[in-house]
Every structure is written in C-alpha cells, then in structure tokens.
Image: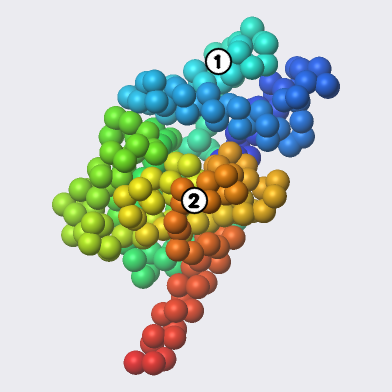
Amino acid sequence: MIDWETGLADVVRMLTAELPGTHPLNTEPPTAAMRRLHDVQDELERAQPTLPYNELLAESLARFARADLGLPGVSDSVAEPFGNSPGAWQPFPDSVAALQRLGRRYRLAILSNVDNANIAATVEKRLAPARFDLVCTAQDIGCYKPELRNFEYLFDKLRDQEGVDARAGELLHVARSLTADHVPAKKIGLPSVWISRGGDREGGQGVGGDYAALRDKVAFGWRFDTLGDFADEVERQFAIKEKAS
C-alpha cells in the first residue's frame, strides 16, 4: 500500500553521500545500503521485539551508520525524524482507489510492523478515504512479523471483533514483503496474494526478499504487479459470477 522503500531511500542517500565514490554501499539507487539497513533492522526486531517501530528505526539507522558506513553515527535531528517518518510516506498511486474498491466487497484488516502513531497517520491521512475494519500493530502485539504470534493475534482479533474465522479459510493475506508476510503465511497455511511491485523481476527485489532465493519458502496463490491490478481481477471475477447468476 505504502511506497516505504522510497521514503527509506531518501534517508539512506543522505548517509551514503558522505562515502567515497568507490564504497560498495555508495550506489544509485542505494539498494545495497537499504538492504543492509533492513538487515540491521531485522536483527534489532528479534533482539528487542517490544521496542516501538519509530525508536527501532532510529536505532537501526545509528547502528548502520557506525558499523557499516564507518560514520560516527547520526544526529538526533536525523534519527528521530526518520523514526517518525513512516506515517508521512506516500501510498502507491493505485493504492487508495484499490482499497476503496476492495472495501466494498470485503472487510479489510491491517497487520503492520509500524508503531501505533505512525500507522494512525498512515490510515487517517495517507490512505483516506479508504477505511479499515481492524488494525493490528507490532506495538500492540509485542513482537514483529515474521513471528507467527503476530498472525495468531490477528486471527483472534478477527474472530472476536469481526466474526471472521481465519483458521477456517475466511482470510486472504495480501502483501508485498516475502520475508515478513509470505514466508510465515506458508508456515501457517494462510492463503496469500503477492503484490510484487517489480519484485518478481531481476533487479527489482528491493528489501522485501529475493523470490529466486525464497521460492520454496513461499506459497502465494496469486501474484499481481499492483494492488490496483488485484482489485481489477476481483471486480472481473464478481462480474463473471453476477452474469452467471
């Protein structure tokens, strides 16, 4: 839904610009540096699962700058705004309209690693007027995806608050990240849709995982380039059913 890699790249460029031109992480786009920062973030998520995402982002950036870039660190004037930036990151151009169309057919729920303040800004400002029936965050749960506990928490909330039985096949998981979403989805037998956004092509993997390396660890039933393409297919399938009835 959100083009968070663009928001991430903007900050990473500020740091890699201080490196020599021959440094392996000083590239354009800064994909290698973004992947390394993401690795640092993953390590911190496992080590400190209750740390809110905004604080985790700031600490990850500082560790990455020191350990991988050889910089003295980052100032609070950079790290703190970075931690609070996800709520300002923009949706993909197709996201809001697609969510509105899907929302007319289905109940929509979010399972996010983002902290409560940032996800509130995303839902209330960036994705409006699309609406969600349920929002679950890592901050509420006390750990981060891909931990299976996050999905179990979502299942319980859907059952108790929305009357949706995910364990009986009433939930379809739609996501971009292979590592955070589709790998655990396969482990628990959760049907899923991969919104690849170019991640199925060489050089387009971003930081959500390499499909060639993860092929045996994921089992999504459908793949679409964009959320808009998925919404188009949903509408097409409903039109076929309505015509046949």
Answer left or right for 180 relative to 36. left
Q: Is residue 85 above or below residue 44?
A: below
Q: Is residue 115 positioned above or below 107 on the image?
A: above
As drawn, is 222 to the left or to the right of 147?
right
- In this view, the residue in front, 173 or 191, is 191
Residue at x-position 60% and y-position 49%: 212
Residue sitting at x 38%, y 45%: 184
Mark identifier at residue 63: 1
- Residue situated furthest left in the rendering: 160
Query: Is 187 or 144 nearer to us in this picture?
Result: 187
Which amino acid lies under the numbered mark 2 shown in the image of this protein? Asp
Frontmost residue, 132 versus 20:
20
Picture coordinates of residue 163 (x, y %)?
Answer: 18, 59
Residue 227 on image: x %, y %: 52, 60
Which residue matches tag 2?
Answer: 216
Q: Residue 182 carries which label?
A: none
Within 10 Å of disc 1 (Cα), the crowding (few <14, some 14-19, many 20+) is many
Tell me the element at label 1. Answer: helix
Dot 2: what SS?
helix
